[in-house]
Amino acid sequence: MSHITPINPSSMAPPAGAYSQAICHSGSGAWLHLSGQVGILPDGSLAQGIADQTHAVWKNIVTLLQAAGMDVSNLVRITTFVIHPDMIKPAGAIRKAYLGACRPASTAISVQALAHPDWLIEIDALAFCHDRER
């Protein structure tokens, strides 16, 4: 049997947001590596503003997870890149709405730019599905 266990030792400060300090995985299953997702809508247009781009990113992530027979509870690692430090907090609030009680390991980074000048946020992720043969 496989297990994903959040690791948040009481000997450390608790996580500063909706994530776990580490995730331990054991057992058999399938890994899903998600490429960096940006605020591109299903019609190919770019959502406008940090809130709309963040929602579009998370909808893309959920769509990819569902296509692989998974959901957000399978996420074990998320890396969020934003182009300004002030965008971390609003993006985090939106992320929390999509994750619910799930707390994958997480890193948020402010960068000077992403691959396209109109992109404000990019998130890549790693998910694990228990006892799944590929």
Image: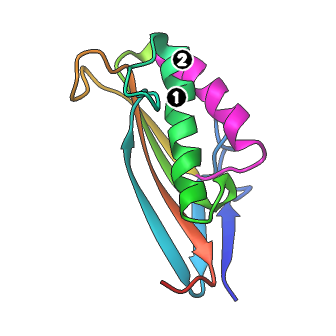
Name the outermost residue toward the right.
101
Q: Which quadrant is home to the N terminus?
A: bottom right
From the image, tell me which residue sits under label 2.
Answer: 52
- Against 55, is 33 above or below? below
| Residue drawn at 55 percent across, 59 percent down | 67
From the image, tell me which residue sits under label 1.
Answer: 56
Residue 95 in which image quadrant: top right
- Against 65, is 116 above or below? above
| Residue drawn at 23 percent across, 16 percent down | 117
| Circle 1 crowding by C-alpha within 10 Å: few under 14, some 14–19, many from 20 | many
Q: How is the image coloured?
A: rainbow
Percent position of residue 43, x then y: 43, 27
Percent position of residue 131, x then y: 63, 84
- Against 50, is 21 above or below? below
Does the magenta segment cover residue 94? yes
SS class, disc 1: helix
Q: Which residues are magenta?
A: 87-104
